Image (cartoon, rainbow, N blue to C red):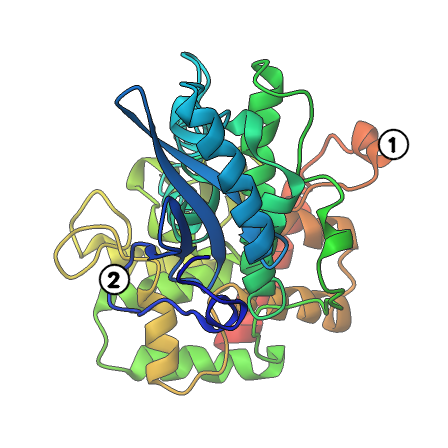
Amino acid sequence: MGNLTVAKVRNAKHSGRTRFHERISDGGTLFLQLAPTGAKCWVQVVQVRGRRHTVGLGGYPLTSLQEAREAAFEIRKAARRGIPPKKGGGRKPGQPTFEEAAAEVVGVQAKTWKVGSKSEAQWRSSLAAYAHPIIGHMRVADVTSADVVAVLRPIWVTKRETARRVKHRIGKVMDWAVVHGHRPDNPCQGVEAALPRVGTAPRHHRALPYADVPAAIAVVRASAAWAGTKLAFQFMVLTAARSGEVRLATWDEVDMDAGVWTVPAARMKMGREHRVPLSGGALDVLAAARELGTDWVFPSARGKVISDATVGKLLRQHGIDAVPHGFRSSFRDWGAERTDFPSEALEAALAHSVRNAVEAAYARTDHFERRRALMDAWAEYVTA
């Protein structure tokens, strides 16, 4: 009847000794495949006319041991007659596996991602960790909604944000498959109905009350950290810019005489060039940064780009309970509660887009002159 039992299948776990999936044999061509993430699925390995075929039979527990055995038995009977299985290694030329399709999609998407973006690495690592062990070997035409659920179920509750991103990325791969004629529909649609209902609370970046920002700047200034890191933090706060925009800043973007820093569209989240009026305090920071003598405005100690973790580490080391992005929230709260500047100017300073389509059609100004006065007032407040 086989080596596996219902209890063995239920209790089977990945050993954790490798990043790759492991398999437990049912005594013939059927295997229970265990992923490092905790996911389980059924895989059958058969030979037809001297050629090896690997077939995905669905995820556990949606596909039970008995159902997997029945499906494997039918495939074995067909294999004896020389008929290859419909799934897995017996795919027709031009019909990619999910893993092959995912690589194609990432390659296409990567051309649109911004310089310095971590998106490509995140796409590849998340799909490799959660999707490929279960559906990577399956051709995209054969992936079902049940297979997608098998990928998501182990992390749907415990790693909610990761699961959401994995679902989104699988969906993008399946959209690609539909467009290229490999399948008629996207199996990601409606899978939430087969997954536990999980309430989601909004998550915000840790931020300081704006009244605590001057003290944070003073602490960083007095620290023994590398000058480039300290100056980058100060400039980030004074300009209310994103960390990545500051870390990758080069001197050809800065006009000291005009007091303007122009961030190119390729580095902006919204994909539009962003002009930043420089306050006296920001210009002082830039003058100090000039002494570091590299093409990067705020280089690392080795003259390279500061890593995305450096500023956050600096804050943690000095007991500042905020993440770099949180200082944009501090600036926004200060502007709303302590000034009379219009919200349009505050949003423009943060390079936020106008959400209402009608308003966006008429919002042709970037409020630059108003923002110059705004940033002067912010610099005076945080450096007083």
List the residue tagged with mark 2: 18
Q: Amino acid at mark 1?
A: Val
Q: Estimate the x, y position of residue 174 in percent, counting from the top left.
A: 58, 30
List the residue tagged with mark 1: 358
The answer to whether residue 381 is left or right of residue 145 is left
Give the Cα separation between the discs numbered 1 and 2. Answer: 54 Å
Residue in view at x 52 percent, y 70 percent: 10
Q: Estimate the x, y position of residue 54 in percent, counting from the top left.
A: 38, 35
The single residue placed furthest to the bottom in the displayed view is 319
Q: Pick whichever, 38 or 366, lies toward us.
A: 38
Label 1 with label 2: CB-CB less than 8 Å:
no
Q: Pick whichever, 229 or 62, lies toward us.
A: 62
The single residue placed furthest to the front in the displayed view is 1
Q: Amino acid at mark 2?
A: Thr
86 up-or-down from 357: above or below: above
Q: Pick whichever, 354 or 252, lies toward us.
A: 354
100 up-or-down from 214: above or below: above
Q: Based on the displayed image, in which of its 4 quarters is residue 116 positioned?
A: top left
Element type where label 1 sits in the image: helix
The answer to whether residue 366 is left or right of residue 239 is right
The answer, for residue 158, to whether it is visible in the render is yes
Q: Estimate the x, y position of residue 105 in percent, counting from the top left.
A: 46, 28
The single residue placed furthest to the left in the displayed view is 302
Element type where label 2 sits in the image: loop
Residue in view at x 49 percent, y 41 percent: 72
